Image (tube, grey):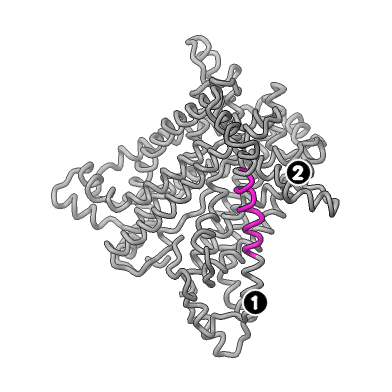
Amino acid sequence: MISRTSHRSTRFERNLATREAPWVKWTLLTLSLSFFALFLILPLVSVFFEALRKGWEVYLLSITEETALAAIKLTVLIAFISVPLNLVFGVAAAWLIAKHDFRGKQLLTTFIDLPFSVSPVIVGLMYMLVFGANGWFGAWLVEHDLKVIFAVPGIVLATIFVTFPFVARELIPLMQAQGRDEEEAAVVLGANGWQTFWYVTLPNVKWGLLYGVILSNARAMGEFGAVSVVSGKIRGQTNTMPLHVEILYNEYNFAAAFAVASLLALLALVTLVIKTWVEHRASSHFNATHMVPADVNTLSPRVMP
Amino acid sequence: MAFALTPNTLFGRQRTGTFRKTYSVLPGFNLSLGYTLGYLTLIVLIPIAAVFLKTSELSFAEFWKVVTAPRVLASYKLSFGASMIAAAINAVFGLMLAWVLVRYSFPGKRIVDALVDLPFALPTAVAGIALTALYARNGWIGQYVEGVLGIKIAFAPAGVLVALVFIGLPFVVRTVQPILEDLETELEEAAASLGARRWQTFRYVLLPILLPALLTGFALAFARAVGEYGSVIFIAGNIPLVSEITPLIIITKLEQYDYVGATAVALVMLLFSFVLLLVINALQAWSSRSIGGSR
């Protein structure tokens, strides 16, 4: 979220009625920022510290070693497949829910949120039950010499599940807040559906869309629980970066584990930087086009489990 | 929310929420409905149905025996207990952090604001090994807490708590923060002019308004913590009956090829999550109502 004032005192601090005594303010600042430093900053710093503990040479060797490279490639591949699929779904679902009225809309929205409340481990288990050797399609898959579980397709499916709602969740409130007037005008003026979407809706929601894509990409690359159940953890074949970190760590190869982990931590930091930038762009875009007071609520990060 | 008065939402509101199908000039209804339902069924609904069907292979007595075995019961106690405490800690510090971010200015505020989302972006396995390194006996924090004070955190139930606090923090901050930002200062001005002290204003004016959002944040953090796996298993030590969380029970059963047992425990957790999801939906509805009412 972008604060509208940075170093000047906020409007609350200048108003007598909304101002606390200095000692209250400093106590709150000290307590909350210490908590923040202890629980968020220290773990982040320690990842990079541990990664470089044995020097740059070990670090570079750990991330360019063959199985590490294979893990990086696989992780990028998984995100490359699952994020676009969920993007298309998110746009379709948002178009349906925000631009149309129909019976059961509330139920559908709840179903779209469902993957957020399922434990990653259970996600892995569910795909085992459907596609595993003893699962529903197990015999059929063996017959046709197809492998889903302990292979890349299983990892992709599990990743799609855990990142399922991100784009939809981001777009639905945004498209609802923007209403239907502009699209209706476009249709009345003779635009077809795709033109309306492409030239009217998409420019209005592009920042929200980008935001959803970034978040689902971060989650797709970092997913651990669901993927660890279905992957089989075959080195060089079905080992994603988070799983590679686990294996190295359990082998007491801490420097290498933290070196690979630091790449994931960098990914997280880049995600946060882009996210902050997108929010900034989104709020200025929205203010410029809609001439309503800045409202962080519509464009603020919604809570993403 | 704040858009309630723009013509767009007013128009939209009049039309939505009814059960009759209203005519929309916008195309793509059938295509997007078909695609959404198809994809949802394939990815989400069929796999979830598999859990219910697999469990039905057990009789109720067998099911009950699996889900109430001592080791499983101990894991519920740890998973739900630690999640509850972690969510409570997050509610307190998350509210404080949201307050500080909205109300005060301090150097580095934007960075703090951006980094609050770190637990969403950082892969859980990375968080897990980092926290373990910090709280182990030779770690930066562990050497004082365990070495000097003698309190064991890593490889003990307290470690589970630490990991769950880490992953739950943004939920509370990000649900409370927008509400705090939207709050009109008139309320506090009225309270102050009527002679309320600052604490009384907070307790009797602000807290009731923030409560639904705070509870929503608490419930979201709790729901996430119950199912969390990646960040916990490294730091927990995973000692049966002591520091073994429920998701790990499922993994252990899977590794022993006990699919039915794993599914039975998973079903208990799924049902619990669904109930929690309903509670969260109700809380969010309450939250938006109470904000609307305060205007």
Question: What is the three-letter code of the residue carrying label 2?
Answer: Ala
Mark 2 to mark 1 CA distance (whole Å) = 34 Å
Instruction: Tell me if residue A38 is in the magenta stretch.
Output: yes
Residue A211 appears in view: yes
Mark 2 belongs to which subunit?
B
- Give the image location of residue A247, x and y in percent: 65, 28
B250 or A286, which lies in front?
A286
Q: What element does badge 1 sit on?
A: helix
Q: Residues within 10 Å of mark 2 (few under 14, many from 20)?
A: many
Residue in view at x 60 percent, y 41 percent: B124
Residue in view at x 44 percent, y 51 percent: A275
**Residue matched to label 2:** B136
- Give the image location of residue B176, x and y in percent: 55, 63
Question: What is the three-letter code of the residue carrying label 1?
Answer: Val
The quarter of the rendered structure image containing the C terminus of chain B is bottom left
Determine the image quadrant of residue B216. Answer: bottom right
Badge number at residue A302: none
- Give the image location of residue A175, x and y in percent: 34, 53
Q: Which residues are magenta?
A: A32-47
**Residue matched to label 1:** A24
A292 or A69, which lies in front?
A69
Residue in view at x 60 percent, y 80 percent: A20
Q: Main secondary structure of the magenta part?
A: helix
